[in-house]
Image: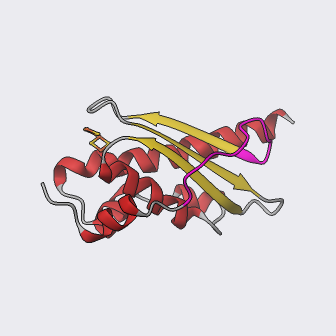
Amino acid sequence: MAYSDKVIDHYENPRNVGTFDKGDDTVGTGMVGAPACGDVMRLQIKVNDEGIIEDAKFKTYGCGSAIASSSLITEWVKGKSLDDALAIKNSEIAEELELPPVKIHCSILAEDAVKAAVADYRKKKEAQ
Ligand code: FES
Ligand code: FES
């Protein structure tokens, strides 16, 4: 199966690969897996005092589409409020990357990772 140019670009030059300290209370960590293929994605957001995501990092063990989806979403969430980040739909990722139907679940993984990261961050805030 052929990957789109955008997938190849993100796959070859992934943006924002890395990790933040999980214990930092300005960091939210989302870890999700795709039962269909076993791929795993970890996405972390760093949130400033105004509730804006100022930075994001990811590590993904998976196919090219999963890596491209996570790379793209780290770019998209930066500068957004938590609610705006939650509003990103996997269909927008799939459209931007021109994912074929069998690779749609890779973009769902990225949407789910954002939701998990925001939930983790909010849980930490409530616990304070
Ligand atoms: Fe092989 Fe996702 S199915 S890496
Ligand atoms: Fe499963 Fe891409 S094939 S995440």
Q: Is residue 106 left or right of residue 74?
A: left
Q: How is the image coloured?
A: secondary structure
Q: Is residue 22 magenta?
A: yes
Q: Is residue 75 or residue 50 the one in the foreground?
A: 75
Picture coordinates of residue 71, whole percent (x, y): 46, 58
Q: How many labels were placed on the picture? A: 0
Is 50 included in the stretch rendered in magenta? no
Residue at 18 percent across and 57 percent down: it is 100
- Whole-percent x and y of residue 118? 62, 46
Magenta range: 16-27
Of all residues, the one furthest to the front in this rendering is 12
Residue in front for this viewpoint, 38 or 124: 38
Q: Give ligand 1's quarter of the image.
A: top left
| Image position, residue 89 (x, y; %) | 41, 58
**Quadrant placement of the N terminus:** bottom left
Main SS of the magenta part reads loop
Name the spot of residue 92 as percent of width and height, x first.
36, 65
**Res. 16 image quadrant:** bottom right
Residue 86 falls left or right of residue 66: right
Residue appearing at x 71%, y 53% in the figure: 46
Residue 75 lies, with reference to residue 107, above or below; the image says: below
Outermost residue toward the left in this view: 1
Quadrant for the C terminus in the image: top right
Q: Residue at x 31, y 51 (%)?
A: 64
Q: Residue at x 77, y 35 (%)?
A: 23
Q: Nearer the viewer, residue 101 or 89?
A: 101
